[in-house]
Structure formats: C-alpha cells, structure tokens
Image (spheres, helix red, strand yellow):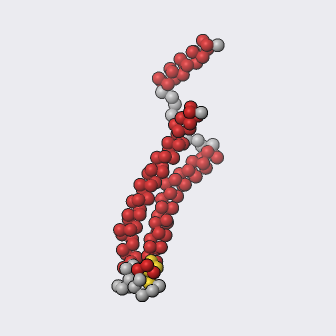
Amino acid sequence: MVKGFKDFLLRGNVVDLAVAVVIGTAFAAVIKTFIDSFVQPIINAAGSSTSPALGFFLRDNDAKTFVNIGAIISAIIYFVIVAAIIYFVVVVPVNNLMERRKRGEEPEVAAPTEDIVLLQEIRDLLRQRSI
C-alpha cells in the first residue's frame, strides 16, 4: 500500500499538477494585486466624490449598506484575465497536441543516447541469464 502511494506521488502527472497549482496561485496573486492597485482606482474614479467607490448607499452614508459595483466589475475583469491566460497558456497548446496526435504527428522523441542503449543491452543480457 505504501509503495502504491509512493508511485502515485512520484508519477509525473502529480508533480506537474502540484507545480501548476503553486504557479497558478502565485500568478493569481499578481493579477489580484494588479486589479486592486490599478484597475480598481480607475473604476472608483468613475463614482461620485461623496461615495468611497463606484456604487451607492442603500441608507444615507451608512458604510454597511454600500453596494460596491466597482468591486464587482473588478472581479469580472480579474476572472476574464485569469480565464484568458489559462486558455492561451494551457488549453490552446493541449488542443494543438491532441490534434497532432489524432493526425498521427506525435512529437518526436529524441533517440536514446549511447549510454542508455548500453544500459538497455546490459539489462537484456541479465534477463537472458536469469531465464
């Protein structure tokens, strides 16, 4: 059971996925900072001088009742930026690879080096000896 778990963790897919999650989280923080520091102030500038952002109060100047439309617009912009980057960095390359596989144009794998060929021959000889 432990060996199976170890094999699962060391499989390339899991490691690649872990790296993707970490990079994605860090990248999302960069986009969020960009939205909060650059886009949000521009959106808030569109609001009136009496309100703290683009939006309106449900009750006169009660901060608890402020409907912040600017924050909603910023969240939509954030989503669109992240979705566009995921699409162009992940989806398009994977779709291109899958299309090439359907056509039988697998990416070429480099021929094994001389030392790998030698090790494979040694492995085959050892297998023959044990039979």
As drawn, 106 above or below 99: above
Q: Residue 33: percent from the left, percent from the top?
A: 38, 63
Q: Residue at x 44, y 51 (%)?
A: 23
Q: Residue at x 53, y 43 (%)?
A: 14
Nearest the camera: 107 or 65?
65
As drawn, 119 above or below 70: above
Please state, as top left, top right, bottom left or bottom right, where the C terminus lies in the image.
top right
Residue located farthest toward the top when viewing the structure as drawn: 129
- State which quadrant residue 41 falls in: bottom left
Q: Is residue 55 visible?
A: no
Q: Residue 10: percent from the left, percent from the top?
A: 52, 37
Q: Is residue 131 visible?
A: yes
Residue located farthest toward the bottom when viewing the structure as drawn: 60
Nearest the camera: 129 or 113?
129
Q: Residue at x 50, y 42 (%)?
A: 15
91 sits left or right of 47 in the view:
right
Nearest the camera: 115 or 56?
56
Q: Residue at x 41, y 80 (%)?
A: 63
Q: Residue 50: percent from the left, percent from the top?
A: 36, 85
As drawn, 106 above or below 125: below
Q: Residue 108: percent from the left, percent from the top?
A: 54, 38
Nearest the camera: 130 or 84?
130
Marks counted in the figure total 0
Please state, as top left, top right, bottom left or bottom right, where the N terminus lies in the image.
top right
